[in-house]
Amino acid sequence: MQEQIGEHILWHLPVLGPVHADTIATTWLVMVVALLFFGWIGASYRSPYMTKRQAVLEAVFNYIADLVTSVLGESGERFVPFFVALFIFIFLLNQFGMLPFKALGLPFGGSPTADLNTVVPLALVVFFTIQIVAFRKKGLSYFGHVLKPFPALLPINVLDEILRPITLAARLFFNIFVGELLFVIVTSIILAHISIGFFNLSLGVAVVPILIQFFNFFVGTIQAFVFTLLAIVYLSLAVAEEH
Amino acid sequence: MNPESIIAAAALLCFGVVISGVAFGSAVGDGIVASKAVESIARQPEARPNIFLFMFLGVGVLEAVPFIAIALAFYILLVVAKVPQIITALVK
């Protein structure tokens, strides 16, 4: 069996053309799991007492809420649900690559974030949210910030603005993609049956995937957090008052 | 000497250069971040959670560049130069 990466099962839709079926199916699965999970958590709010699962989840919510209000100030409180949803969605998308759906022969599986078609829309959502929020707050004078501190810097400022969503998407995509690439490399080393003298390299490498799995869990969490935090910081830069 | 072996050799050399540069650079960068974090925790132990937050943010932002470089190095090795196929053809 040859392990493949970067290849997707395609659906040929009438208007949209070919789409990546496994990415879409896994994203739907993540959404269903997230909805069921939060429904289960939300059920505990019907009882008058605090439950354990409620306390754990509220710790995560409070952490992000404190972060948003400390960066954006009190007016940032209405963006807390957006950023909490962003963090939890990206976190779940990253961690779903851990489950071996594809290895079991199912038509879905793998991290949807290891596909540019998932991360670019997420970055664009953040980009347009920031532009619209800043425009509604400041009006047309918001677009004057590309002329600050003096008009000659216009190209650099515009480039900076455009590069932000690109780097946001590329950072998330390549981190998750390389995590899956490492598995392909290890699989190919194991399948090659390499032995140097008495040392069987293929057998020795067979313990590595569990370490990569821990590393991927760490990287997925960190990158979900970095994505959210950078979105918060970019929003705070866009809506900041002039001094 | 056939041209395919020269391509394979050049691609492997390029792969090694990219990987070593990435390993060196990211190790130095992560080391600077961690050492500064330890320094500032020693100076202000009460600011520890905040420092950890920004340390992980810095590591996360920084770690993207080596990953992009590794992905491009493997792209050159496996897709552009097709080194494994060349090597298996040469060995036979």
Image (cartoon, grey):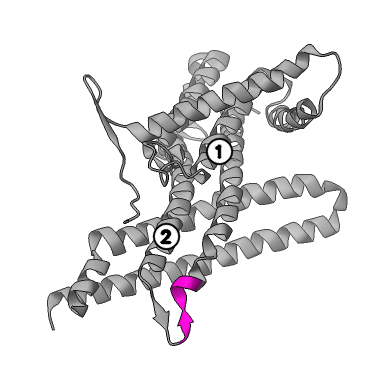
Q: Residue furthest front?
A: A104
Say few, some or many: other residues with alpha carbon within 10 Å of mark 2 (under 14 / 14 to 19 / 20 or more).
many
Going by the numbered disc 2, the residue's amino acid type is: Ile
Q: Chain of mark 2?
A: B
Q: How many marks?
A: 2
Going by the numbered disc 1, the residue's amino acid type is: Phe
Query: Helix or strand or loop: what does disc 1 sit on?
Result: helix
Kindly indicate the quadrant of the structure image that contains residue A119.
top left
- Image point 64% across, 22% down: which residue? A38
What is the distance, in whole Å, between disc 1 and disc 2 at their CAs?
20 Å
Q: Is residue A158 above or below residue B36?
A: above
**Could you tell me residue B84's position as x and y percent?**
27, 68
Residue A197 in the figure: left or right of residue A219? left
Residue A129 in the figure: left or right of residue A17? right
Q: Chain of mark 1?
A: A
Q: Is residue A79 above or below residue A188?
A: above
Is residue B69 among what the camera can see?
A: no
Q: Which residues are magenta?
A: A198-203
Quarter of the rendering occupied by the N terminus of chain A = bottom left
- The residue beneath circle 2 is B70
Nearest to the observer: residue B83 or residue A29: A29
Q: Is residue B37 above or below residue A120?
A: below
Nearest to the observer: residue A198 or residue A179: A198
**Could you tell me residue A239's position as x and y percent?**
59, 24
Say few, some or many: other residues with alpha carbon within 10 Å of mark 1 (under 14 / 14 to 19 / 20 or more).
many
- Image point 41% across, 67% down: which residue? A190
Whether residue A90 is in magenta: the answer is no
Name the disc covering residue A227, or none: 1
Same chain for the residues under marks 1 and 2 in the image: no
Nearest to the observer: residue B25 or residue B16: B16
**Could you tell me residue B31's position as x and y percent?**
64, 65
